[in-house]
Image (cartoon, helix red, strand yellow):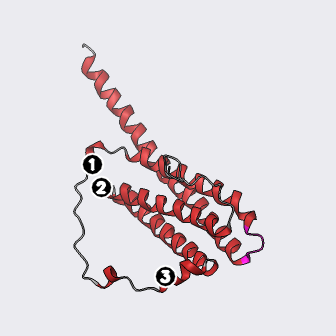
Amino acid sequence: MSYTYPSGQPQGTARKVTNRLREIMIAELIAINGYQRHIANSYMINVNEVWHRIMLDEIRHYETVLNLLRKYDPVQYKASLEQHEDYLKPKSPMQLYNPSYEKQIILNNIREDIKGELEAVILYEEEIEAYSSYKDIKIAIQSIIDDEKEHTEHLTQVLKKYENEQFIYIKEKGKSESHKHSKP
């Protein structure tokens, strides 16, 4: 059984501080994967730039929480110091990906991302009080919450811009279709 819901979001049921941090890391990984998938399947440069900036924030969030986890979990810290054999091997080439642009509904992807940002805010705000005796964690989580709220607003502005353009296109297309069908 997966610890996460089918969409991948953590259940938010952890009690230990270190496991609560892991829940946040899971949520951040899901966000990173989502933004990466959307960028790979879009040729809309402006939208991809927004997604990329937000994805970099999500990577930073993941790294921040991982560092906190290492601070409070000695086994995690020890494991981070070990040199793994595969790290020393030459890097293999990146696998090529051929997206199918015509099947993508970019505005739905943006809505999905807004939903994910809102879910992150809810999860993190519900959890922040659990860190009352961990000032460093509480400060880091509050900073992440603030970023997630900013992401929500940024994505909403992008969505509104493209929804308006889509509405105008559909309206104009409808006018031209009605002119084709009307008889002189």
| Span colored in magenta | 131-135
Q: Is residue 155 visible?
A: yes
Counting every numbered tag in the picture gives 3
At 37% from the left and 82% from the top, the residue drawn is 84
Answer above or below: position of 161 versus 15: above
**CA separation in Å, label 1 and label 3:** 39 Å
Q: Which residue bears the numbered disc 3?
A: 80
Q: Which residue bears the numbered disc 2?
A: 43
Q: Which amino acid does label 2 sit on?
A: Tyr
Residue 120 x %, y %: 59, 57
Q: Which amino acid does label 1 sit on?
A: Tyr
Please name whichever residue, 132 or 53, is drawn nearer the observer in this view of the structure: 132
> Is 20 on the left-hand or right-hand side of 129?
left
Residue at the far right in the pictured view: 133
Residue 137 x %, y %: 67, 74
Q: Which residue bears the numbered disc 1?
A: 101
> Is 55 on the left-hand or right-hand side of 125?
left
Answer above or below: position of 97 versus 176: below
Please tell me whether mark 1 or mark 2 is closer to you in this view: 1
Question: Callout 1 environment at 10 Å: few (<14), some (14 to 19), or many (20+)?
Answer: few
Secondary structure beneath label 2: loop
